[in-house]
Amino acid sequence: MTEDDITELARKLGRACKRRALEVSVAESCTGGGLAAAITRIAGSAKWFDRGFVTYSNTAKKELLGVSQRTLRNHGAVSEPVAREMVRGVLKKSPSELAVSITGIAGPSGGSRDKPVGLVWIAWGVRGGPLQSRAFHFKGGRVEVRKQSVAMALQGLIDLLR
C-alpha cells in the first residue's frame, strides 16, 4: 500500500461524498491523524470532510467521544465495543452523515497473545443507520499497519456509499 494508493482512495471517497452531498468525520487512535491527513491531501476536501478526532489516549476517547470507562475496562481500547462507541461519538459530536473510527495496535510493542501487534478494529456508521465493524490483522511494521488501517477505513466508507 503506497501513499499514492491511499490518496486515490481518498479521491474516490471525495467524489462519492460530493455526488451524494454527504459529509464525513473520523475518529482515530493508532493512526494518529493519518486518516484525516490522507483526506485533506485532496484539494476541495473541505466540501465533504468536517473534522477528525485524534483520541490516542483512553482519556481522550472518553472526553471527546463519550466512550465509557466501563467499556474500556471490560474490553480494552483495542476492541469492537470501543470502535463502535467511537464511531457513535463521532456521529453525536459532528454534523456529518458518515463516520469511521480506528483503534488498534500498530507496534512495534504493545501487543499480547490475545491482541497482537497488527490487530486493528475499524467501525463505520451512517447517521440513522446501522453500524458496521470489523477486525483486521495487518502484517508489517508500524508504518505499514497504520497505512493499511487508513486504506481500509477509506475503502469501508466508499463501500458504504455504493
Image: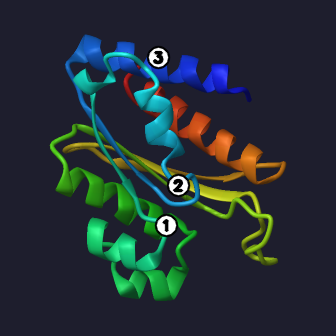
Which residue is depicted at the point 58% across and 69% down? 78
For the N terminus, the image quarter is top right
- In this view, 10 is above or below 144: above
What number of labels is visible?
A: 3
Residue at numbered disc 3: 11
- Separation (CA) of disc 1 from disc 3: 26 Å
Could you tell me residue 121's position as x and y percent? 57, 57
Amino acid type assigned to the residue bearing label 1 in the image? Tyr
Q: Is residue 60 left or right of residue 33?
A: left
For the C terminus, the image quarter is top left
Amino acid type assigned to the residue bearing label 3 in the image? Arg
Residues 28 and 161: in front is 28
Disc 2 + disc 1, Cβ < 8 Å = yes
Within 10 Å of disc 2 (Cα), the crowding (few <14, some 14-19, many 20+) is some
Residues 154 and 32: in front is 32
Residue at numbered disc 2: 32
Q: Which mark is residue 56?
A: 1
Could you tell me residue 150's position as x and y percent? 57, 40
Badge 2 marks a residue whose secondary structure is loop
- Separation (CA) of disc 2 from disc 1: 7 Å
Q: Earlier in the sequence, mark 1 or mark 3?
A: 3
Amino acid type assigned to the residue bearing label 2 in the image? Gly
Could you tell me residue 134's position as x and y percent? 56, 51
- Separation (CA) of disc 3 from disc 2: 20 Å
